[in-house]
Amino acid sequence: MSATTPTKADRPNPEKVDSPPGGPGSAGGWTGVRARLSVMRPVSRRLTGLAALAMVLVPVAAVLWGSGSWPGALGVDVSGPLDDLSKWIVDNRDTSPIFLYFLLHISNTSLDAVDGVYQLLDFLGWTGVTAAAVLLAWRAGGAGRSGLKVAAIALGALAGCGLLNMWEPAMVTLSLMVVAVAVSALVGFLLGLAAGLSDRVDRALRPVLDTMQVLPAFAYLLPFVLIFGTGSPAALLATVIYAAPPMARLTALGLRGADPAVLEASASLGASGWQRLRTARLPLARKELLLGLNQTIMMALSMVVIASVIGAGGLGDEVYSALSTVDVGAALAAGIPIVLIAVWLDRTTEAAGEQLGAPPAADGPRVLRLPVYLGARPLRLGSRLLYAGRIRWITVTVSTVATALGTVAALVAGKIAGAAMWPDAWTFDVSSPVNDFQTWMVDHIHAGVPILGGTEVWASNFTSWVLNPLRDVLQGAPWWSLLLLVAGLALLAGTWRTALGAAAALAATGVLGVWSITLDTLSQVLAAVALTLVLGVVIGILAARVSWVERALRPVLDVLQTLPQFVYLIPVVALFGVGRAAAITAAVMYALPAVVRITTQGLKQTDPAALEAARSLGATGMQQLRQVQLPLARPALLLAVNQGVVLVLAVVIVGGLVGGGALGYNVVFGLSRGDLGVGLVAGAAIVCLGLVLDRVTQPAPARRKDG
Amino acid sequence: MQTRQRRIFRTALAVAAGLGLTVVAGCGAADTGKSTSAGGNDTITLTKPSWVGAEANVAVAKYVLENELDYKVTTKQMGEVIAWDALGKGTIDAIMEDWGHPEQEKQYVEEKKSVVAAGDLGVTGHIGWFVPKYWADKNPDVTDYKNLDKYADQLKTSESGGKGQLLEGSPDYVTFDDAIIKNLDLNLKTVYAGSEAAQITQIQQNAKAKKPFLTYWWTPQWLNNVVDMVEVKLPAYKEGCDADPKKVACAYPNTPLQKYLNADFAKDGGKGAEFLKNFKWTAEQQNEVAKMIAQDKMSPDAAAKKWVDANPDVVKAWLP
């Protein structure tokens, strides 16, 4: 997991770097205008255009609808129809043909599938499951001595689940995972295949995937609950939506990135399109496919936890239940297995990827699969694959047979010993020491710390002096000025199209009637992002320059990224009190790891020649950092901003659980009451806000083309 | 080349679509029954609400069902309203503790007839505004709502916008507090903790520092054994004074907590359904178990076993 943990940050999004969302084709209509205005510098040219537009429209809008909060005349009340829809669904769930002939099939099939996998795991018993996992990991790691480390990780992870007395919930989670990953990978692969082969599909799919990337998972849980009820089907489908995009993106990327020379060669040998796909393009894209699978697994795992809110069961449910007794220790005991499973699956798929013949990353153990991210694709595997052929095939067969035999042996041994469940004697309880530690820590830094004042005082000062003014300014500003501001910022970062999209998305929140609470959420998001960036960049610089810091940080970041946010809900409230400060702390903790990683990686990947040159000119460490590394790492830093925003927004709802109020609370409200009118509108507003922020911060290279 | 790819693609799409249709058509109508509950007849699924009192009901019922009546019991955690929906669908078989959901009762019990009432739980719930005892002892007049404005300053937090803070809990819970504040013209503001866990943590933190606070709270609740709280008197409850949610200006009623069963389960559930109908205990008994779970951090199963072993007569009366 050093590489990829289940966050949207790590979802590779090469398109964003490779080519602007607008694409070359979209600029067509504007070329004429552009030519006329080309004497001006591109940015000021576009801003002038916006200013001119504003001078005409703003007075009209201000006169018509005033200059306060969003005008009521421009709103649409959707809660009535939504409530009707919700009632209709409940009343017709058992009779309407849509349900009988379509949705219920999906529901029943997915339930059976999850149930079937669970039965299988249950049948294997803990010995069988552990043996299968360890041997598969060993086999993925190369089936030799090289595979031992991966196998040890698998053994450690499963033993950890058992030792913490979480074996059964871990198996429930695992069975949901198996089905979810299989479906997501299949759906993602098919979409990616289409996008990789057809430019038209690619163009159509890209904005959809972009939107899915900023879609906070909680926002779309509710409709699934209404349609499928609580339980695994709803959780499964929500997970698929969340986890399929990286597979689709990476499949398309792999297919498109195939070496043209190889394709040309196979075409000249007379291969048909289908043959070329099967024998050249797909094999060449194998590494991307595996990376996609890895990302899909990580995202599915994080989603499985979130889905516990709608009754998915398993580890997430244990974490969630521990909350009702305010038992941090118990929540942690269920949270750690999730981290362990993430590490295990990540290392196993990663090892499988490396076995495909790609040389290990040049800079030692890689921290994040950033190369893919930043658009420089490590595509060196093709040729090796073609040779390794037969010998590998034999090894593979032998090790597969060994894996199967080993599993059966362990299964039989387990059955003879009569152990289906992890033995109770081999468990131990971590919750009381953790709870004691929590109490101790809170008592000592909560309040009354000399000079510093303690966390509660900070929280209240932060709220009074930063959050309240920020919120009041946003809510007090005339509605058209905010639209204008957003359009201007988006224009600076991208094209007219992005500007229009951003302004429209913000306006949509007003139309939905949640203007003012959206701005409340926005103020929290802005504060959280600022805090994340300051901390993240400082830590990232430190980690990039001092290698032991990076080593020490890696496991911490891994844990922070995979641990379900529910676990730190209680400590956060205990330290900062119910309110927005607590919500922001939770968001910062979630978004920080990605920002730190992207910064570190960006700094470390600066051209060594440039650094060397600066050094030989006598630049001090500080000067190197400021004048060479940071400017060169600009794309990475911009990406960090963008990912920070997306991640912070993704946990707005967790903020709703600790007193953050605003949109997060409304989503929680809608979810727990099944109230579509409130929940879906708030979810849609979060999505709109996500689109606005994504467009405004997107590190769009469009400028390169213009300037 | 492009055209050929496209053709292949279209063919593939058509084949996929055709296959999909065949599958759907071949299957016919799907089974709508207990489509989301795994297991056979002798599995009972109960909803495990997020508050501990209700968890105590479920723990004891589960223990008895599994050990005396040989059922397998699964529990599902879900929001109250969602639990009603699940009960109507048959995803769960019973709600052990309901605090009153008139809208859902109308939709599922009267209109769809997929849920039936299963009698009193025996516990009476009461919602109200509470202040800590240590604060009320020092300022005895704070327990009357008319004097709350005087203390608004002490209740102020950075979240309450210059007014006194009234701490609210999970969005799940029935509350009219915004209307009550408005209609009684109090200098207070509701601050939603968003979850019971956050609310409890905040109360414990305040109690540790002996700070004044005002909170939406209820009995029975295990935390009342840990933090002593006193109820603030609101204008007395009268039948129908909470009929219009916007015009409420009175206290919350005493609610005899109810049990509900899925209609099919109530009919065909055999001894299990019979037992759940008989299940009835007092607030003290419930609190005893809740405290073992919440405060002594025992697992619900262990707490249930301890209580059942200590109260064999009570349990015997429930058995069919």
Image (cartoon, coloured by chain):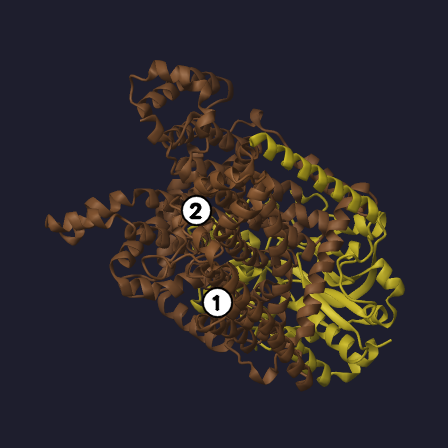
Q: CA distance from mark 2 to mark 1?
A: 65 Å
Q: Quadrant of the N terminus of chain B?
A: top right
Q: Which residue is mark 1?
A: A142
Please count the marks in the image: 2
Q: Position of residue A326 (x, y in %)?
A: 54, 67
Quadrant of the image occupied by residue B84: bottom right
Where residue A332 sits in the image (x, y, percent)?
Answer: 50, 69
- Residue B169 shows in the view: no
Q: Which tint was used for chain B?
A: yellow
Give the amino acid at mark 1.
Gly
Name the chain under label 2: B
Number of the front mark, 2 or 1: 1
| Residue, disc 2 | B162
Query: Dot 2: what SS?
Result: loop
Give the image location of residue B217, x and y in percent: 59, 60
Residue in the picture at 52% in, 38% down:
A267
Image quarter hosting the C terminus of chain B: bottom right
Q: Amino acid at mark 2?
A: Gly
In this rendering, is residue A352 above or below A526?
Answer: below
Residue at figure coordinates x 30%, y 42% from the top left:
A634
Q: Which chain is brown?
A: A
The one of A36 and B45 positioned closer to us in this rendering: A36
Q: Please provide percent x and percent y for residue A602.
A: 32, 49
Side (left or right) of B27 relative to B55: right
The quarter of the displayed image where residue A469 is located = top left
